Image (cartoon, grey):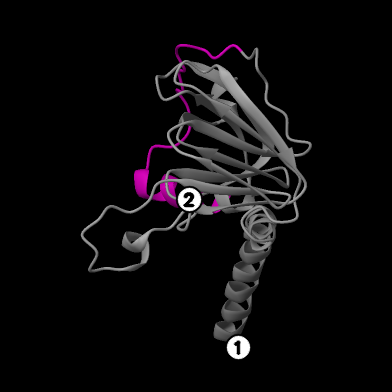
């Protein structure tokens, strides 16, 4: 009888955790399953090494993938894999390589004049590394309050994004790119320096 109660409690806790972890993670899966940005309205901004914006393109149907060559799909090829992004915006084609590119879904705005502290001191909490990493992994799937500081490849600040529920993933099919789900909106960062902090660290 005691064993059955323990099993019921154990599975109840597992179900609760699965429901919790589904919050941000599920939103991210739904967003990415639309087809690598398909069906979502995005603003695409490119920046040079000095964080100057060089181009802005907007579209209601955006897809992103690699411009493939034989090395991308032929293991015996002696060539190099393509790093060229092939971007389709409402049916029109755009190629890009080398620039910092930010794909922000409509409604997701960058904070451009945010003052980033030069020093952050955290003196309380944590202390047991394996457990801390496990807890942070669970919280990441649930969605944590985070601040994303984006800089050019030269390390010059571009801007900041913030959200109450932020989920971070690395798309396997889009190299040099990070995908974030910020309060249900998608943000893709390509070829940029960035720091993602728990917002509570900034307080």
User: For the residue labelled by badge 1, is the local secondary structure a helix, a strand or a loop?
Assistant: loop
Q: Nearer the viewer, residue 13 or 137?
A: 137
The answer to whether 106 appears left or right of 6 in the picture is right
**In front: 145, or 158?**
158
Residue occupying the point 54% across, 38% down: 189
**Image coordinates for residue 20, horizontal then vertical, percent:** 67, 58
Q: Mark 2 to mark 1: distance in Å?
A: 45 Å
Q: Is residue 202 left or right of residue 119?
A: right
Q: Which of these two is toward me, 126 or 38?
A: 38
**Sequence-first disc among 2 and 1:** 1
Q: Quadrant of residue 54?
A: top right
Question: Which label number is shown at residue 1?
Answer: 1
Left or right of 170: which side holds 165?
right
Residue position marked by numbered label 2 in the rendering: 170
Relative to residue 1, is residue 23 depicted above or below? above
Rendered-image quadrant of the C terminus: top right
The residue at the far bottom in this view is 1
Q: In the image, is residue 133 part of the stretch drawn in magenta?
A: yes
Q: Which residues are magenta?
A: 115-139
């Amino acid at each position: 009888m005691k064993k059955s109660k323990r099993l019921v409690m154990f599975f109840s806790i597992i179900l609760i955790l699965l429901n919790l972890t589904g919050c941000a993670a599920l939103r991210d899966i739904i967003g990415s399953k639309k087809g690598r940005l398909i069906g979502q309205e995005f603003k695409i901004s490119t920046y040079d090494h000095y964080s100057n914006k060089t181009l802005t393109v907007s579209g209601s149907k955006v897809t992103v993938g690699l411009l493939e060559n034989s090395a991308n799909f032929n293991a015996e090829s002696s060539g190099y894999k393509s790093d060229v992004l092939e971007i389709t915006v409402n049916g029109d084609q755009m190629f890009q390589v080398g620039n910092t590119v930010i794909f922000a879904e409509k409604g997701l705005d960058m904070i451009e004049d945010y003052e980033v502290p030069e020093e952050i001191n955290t003196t309380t909490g944590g202390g047991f590394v394996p457990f801390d990493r496990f807890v942070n992994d669970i919280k990441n799937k649930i969605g944590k309050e985070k601040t994303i500081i984006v800089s050019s490849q030269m390390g010059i600040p571009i801007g900041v994004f913030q959200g109450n529920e932020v989920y971070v993933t690395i798309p396997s099919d889009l190299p040099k790119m990070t995908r974030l789900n910020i309060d249900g909106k998608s943000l893709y960062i390509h070829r940029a320096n960035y720091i993602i902090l728990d917002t509570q660290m900034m307080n």
